[in-house]
Image: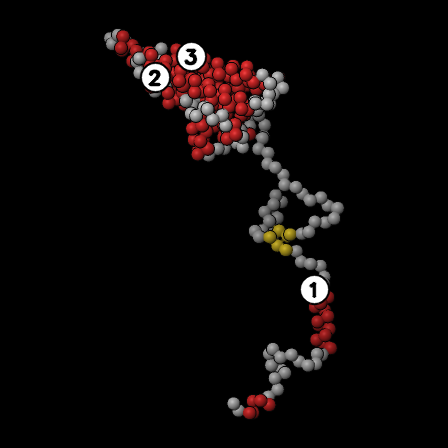
């Protein structure tokens, strides 16, 4: 290496540290230090603020001021009044897989854990859908059953579609699914037991699902087979209501009477379906 480069002064080069600091440099450093000790800057939160006052810009993460209460997160209340349709939308906000799971639970009456499954989100969708489907199934298949019976006894006799089956099925099914849980609710409240009307409606609504698939084999024009089918379906539906109701009211008094009445009403409904729609 050439020795001429070794004698060069490097104090003015980038990265070198001068041995003597001027007074102007010291005053500048003092000014910077005083600025850095000032009020701390507020942190910004992304995305920009989108509050109710339509203010724009970024939110600032400020430390709570002493004496000022910290705002708590308000729970959403979707109830807008009895005559507002939007008040009831929360009871129909349920996924398809959840509904299918509850439908399958109604076909296994001995489990008795239906209230645990619907505890987080009891729905009215199952009651409305099941009752509406059952009304049209009973009206249509009931007329088909009368047609088969009439053609079996007298093939030359005329047959007329009975439209009154729809009115009767709607009155019986909807009336039973709404009024019976309502009566149990007020009765249990009067006796001092715990009761939840929405959960009762959900329970009785899903208890009627078993009558939809069992209505099809009731078209078999054999009276003995029809009675066996409807009694099995009625027993399964009755056990579903009774066992789940007993597990729900296990800490209450006079549970046996309530469970027996619920079982008997379900059996009465199944017998009524057989006698009136599938004679």
Q: Mark 1 highlights which residue?
A: 36
Q: Residue at x 70, y 79 (%)?
A: 21
Density class for disc 1 (Cα within 10 Å; few <14, some 14-19, many ≥20) is few
* Residue at point 33%, 11% (across, down): 223
Distance of label 1 from label 3 (alpha carbons)? 86 Å
Q: Are marks 2 and 3 in contact (CB under 8 Å)?
A: no
Which label is found at residue 19?
Answer: none
Determine whether, in the image, residue 227 is placed left or right of residue 248: left
Quadrant where the C terminus sits is top left
- Marker disc for residue 272: 3
| Residue at 70%, 49% in the rendered image | 64
Label 3 CA crowd tier, 10 Å (few <14, some 14–19, many 20+): some
Is residue 77 visible to the viewer in this orientation of the structure? yes
Cβ atoms at labels 1 and 3 below 8 Å apart: no
Residue 128 screen position, x and y as percent: 46, 24
- For marks 2 and 1 on the same chain, the one whose residue lies earlier in the sequence: 1
Rounded to the nearest whole Å, what is the CA distance between mark 2 and mark 3? 13 Å
225 or 212: nearer the viewer = 225
| N-terminal label among 1 and 3 | 1
189 in relation to 50, above or below? above
Residue that numbered label 2 is attached to: 218
In the rendered image, residue 166, in percent from the top left (x then y), is placed at 40, 16
Question: Residue 272 is drawn in which quadrant?
Answer: top left
Q: Tell whether label 1 touches label 2 (CB within 8 Å).
A: no
Q: CA distance from mark 2 to mark 1?
A: 87 Å
Give the secondary structure at mark 3.
Answer: helix
């Amino acid at each position: 290496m050439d020795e001429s480069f070794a004698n060069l002064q490097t104090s003015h080069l980038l990265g070198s540290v001068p041995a003597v600091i001027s007074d102007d440099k010291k005053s500048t450093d003092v000014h910077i230090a005083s600025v850095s000790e000032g009020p701390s800057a507020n942190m910004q939160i992304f995305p920009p603020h989108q509050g109710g006052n339509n203010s724009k810009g970024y939110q600032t993460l400020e430390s709570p001021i002493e004496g000022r209460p910290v705002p708590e997160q308000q729970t959403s209340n979707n109830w807008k009044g009895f005559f507002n349709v939007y008040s009831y939308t929360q009871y129909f906000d349920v996924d398809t897989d959840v509904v299918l799971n509850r439908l399958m639970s109604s076909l296994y009456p001995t489990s008795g854990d239906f209230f645990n499954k619907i505890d987080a989100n009891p729905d009215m969708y199952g009651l409305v859908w099941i009752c509406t489907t059952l009304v049209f199934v009973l009206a249509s298949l009931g007329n088909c059953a009368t047609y088969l019976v009439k053609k079996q006894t007298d093939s030359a006799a005329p047959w007329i579609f009975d439209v009154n089956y729809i009115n009767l099925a709607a009155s019986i099914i909807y009336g039973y699914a709404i009024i019976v849980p309502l009566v149990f609710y007020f009765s249990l409240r009067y006796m001092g037991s715990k009761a939840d009307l929405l959960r009762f409606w959900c329970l009785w609504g899903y208890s009627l699902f078993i009558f939809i698939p069992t209505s099809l084999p009731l078209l078999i024009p054999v009276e003995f087979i029809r009675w066996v089918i409807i009694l099995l379906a009625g027993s399964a539906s009755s056990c579903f209501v009774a066992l789940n109701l007993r597990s729900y009211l296990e800490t209450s008094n006079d549970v046996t009477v309530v469970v027996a009445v619920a079982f008997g009403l379900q059996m009465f409904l199944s017998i009524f379906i057989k006698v009136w729609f599938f004679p």
